[in-house]
Amino acid sequence: MTTITRSLIDTKTMAERNLLKSISSPDKLIENVIAPVMTMLIFVFVLGGALEETTGEMSYVNYVVPGVILLCIGQCSTTTAISVSMDIEKGIISRFRSMPIAQSSVLTGRVIEAVLRTMFTVVLIILAAFLVGFRPSAGIAGWAGCAALLLLFSLTITWISVVYGLLVKSAESAGSITMFIMLFTYLSSGFIATETLPSVLRVFAENQPMTPIIEAARAMLLNRALDNNLLLAAVWCIVLGLAAHIAAVRLYKRKLWRS
């Protein structure tokens, strides 16, 4: 058996292990769905009337759904950071070191499981959005492009969450990644037009990763002009994802060396 084949088999095994753990603990999946759905309901039905005028001719529910989807993906990544940190706390990482498996499969299997879980959660969020009035006008190409972008973003934020889980010293600390996710999501074009923000916040909102990703997803779902948002979104995701992947591998090797 070649090294690559063995690594693929081990990665599949680790992904299945993590999937089984997720299925046996559905509370995290429910939490990841409920929080974004509640946010969507608050913005649509409580704040939507006041914010409707900031979106021009677009209905507010159509405007806000892409931001809610990214918030959902971010919430799911919190679970990944906590799980990684718990594996370290409980010594599971040390046990994996003594097993005859490809060590890279531990992280890769975790990421594959997280992305699958996240995309399933995204589908549930979109179904909930239809119930509250979301009416996209995307064709097959638009849906496919949006799905590809969300998959890329999910992969990126998952690797970032793995890095965070490896850096912090406890599972409780790992949960604090939610604060950063909420900060970047709310200070973007996800829930209000950036033109309505104070000048300093507007500069931040228009030059951080979440805004072009949200704008590109919104454009594809609503069949609007993409401008350069898709390119910016792809560049942000690829650069951040590669950097996080490299950092995660190095941190993981350091953890193994110390264990």
Image (tube, grey):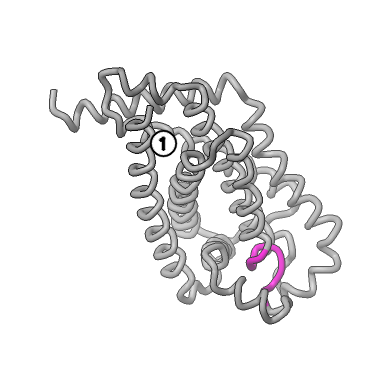
Residue sitting farthest toward the left? 2
| Residue at 69% over, 79% down | 195
The residue tagged 1 is 112
Position of residue 89 measured from the top left corner of the image (x, y, whole percent)? 52, 26
Specify the quadrant of the image occupied by residue 46. Answer: bottom right
**Magenta-highlighted residues:** 187-194
Specify the quadrant of the image occupied by residue 174. Answer: top right
Position of residue 64 measured from the top left corner of the image (x, y, whole percent)? 69, 60
Q: Is residue 6 above or below residue 46?
A: above
Position of residue 134 measured from the top left corner of the image (x, y, whole percent)? 69, 55
Direction from residue 244 to residue 219 in the image, left or right: right
Asked if one can make out residue 126 in the rendered structure from this viewpoint, the answer is: no
| Residue at 59% over, 61% down | 137
How crowded pointer 1 is (Cα within 10 Å; few <14, some 14-19, many 20+) is rated as: many
Closer-to-camera residue (15/182): 182
Q: Is residue 197 above or below residue 219?
A: below
Locate the C terminus and report the quarter of the image it occupies: top left
Position of residue 146 measured from the top left corner of the image (x, y, whole percent)? 49, 56
Q: Is residue 94 above or below residue 247?
A: above
Locate the N terminus and report the quarter of the image it occupies: top left
| Residue at 71% over, 68% down | 192
Closer-to-camera residue (17/152): 17
Closer-to-camera residue (177/195): 177
Direction from residue 60 to residue 47 in the image, left or right: right
**Element type at marker 1?**
helix
Q: Tell me which secondary structure the magenta stretch mostly adopts.
A: loop
| Residue at 34% over, 42% down | 249
Instruction: Residue type at mark 1: give it.
Output: Ile
Residue sitting farthest toward the bottom? 199
Does the segment drawn in magenta span residue 44? Answer: no
Direction from residue 32 to residue 213 in the image, left or right: left
